[in-house]
Amino acid sequence: QVRLVESGGGLVQAGGSLRLSCAASGSTISINRMGWYRQAPGKQRDLVARVTSDGSTNDADSVKGRFTVSRDNAKNTVYLQMNSLKPEETAVYYCNFNFYSWPGTRDFWGQGIQVTVSS
């Protein structure tokens, strides 16, 4: 089994920065990609940014140039550096680990961490 523990959320003023971390423990071999999603009240969960095993990243258009996703393979940890935060980015942020699990892949999710951006 895999356990994901998120940290780094909280309250920040508009224009400020936060850094989220998510560490995986347990059966962490064969990680495919890691990433972050967010869900605002009454809305669907959307991709924020993710990074694959070869280091390629995929960012939502709304965060390009402001957010940076990175991974530390040795620590089984994914990070999300968020700069120039906006009030509309207030949401619960979830980390996601996707593992190779024959014959396909399998997703694991963190418990979610609140990010609140005040205006």
Image (cartoon, rainbow, N blue to C red):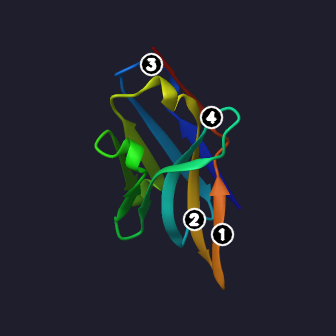
Quadrant housing the N terminus = bottom right
Label 2 to label 1, Cα distance in Å? Answer: 6 Å
Quadrant housing the C terminus = top left
Element at badge 1? Answer: strand
Assess whether mark 4 and mark 3 are in contact (beta carbons under 8 angstroms). Answer: no
Neighbourhood count class around disc 4 (C-alpha, 10 Å): few under 14, some 14–19, many 20 upward: some
Assess whether mark 1 and mark 2 are in contact (beta carbons under 8 angstroms). Answer: yes
Q: Residue furthest left?
A: 65
Q: Position of residue 97 (x, y in %)?
A: 57, 59
Amino acid carrying mark 4 in the image: Ala
Label 4 to label 1, Cα distance in Å? Answer: 24 Å
The residue pinned by badge 1 equals: 106
The residue pinned by badge 4 equals: 40
| Mark toward the start of the polypeptide (3 vs 4) | 3
Neighbourhood count class around disc 2 (C-alpha, 10 Å): few under 14, some 14–19, many 20 upward: some
The residue pinned by badge 2 equals: 98
The residue pinned by badge 3 equals: 12
| Mark toward the start of the polypeptide (3 vs 2) | 3
- Tell me the mark number nearer the camera, choosing from 2 and 4: 4
Query: Is residue 87 rendered to the left or right of residue 69?
Result: right
Residue 87 seen in the figure? yes
Amino acid carrying mark 1 in the image: Arg
Query: Is residue 60 rendered to the left or right of residue 22?
Result: left
Amino acid carrying mark 3 in the image: Val
Label 2 to label 4, Cα distance in Å? Answer: 22 Å
Neighbourhood count class around disc 1 (C-alpha, 10 Å): few under 14, some 14–19, many 20 upward: few
- Tell me the mark number nearer the camera, choosing from 3 and 2: 3
Amino acid carrying mark 2 in the image: Asn
Q: Residue at image x 36%, y 70%? A: 54
- Tell me the mark number nearer the camera, choosing from 3 and 4: 4
Query: Is residue 68 rendered to the left or right of residue 112?
Result: left
Q: Residue at image x 42%, y 66%? A: 52
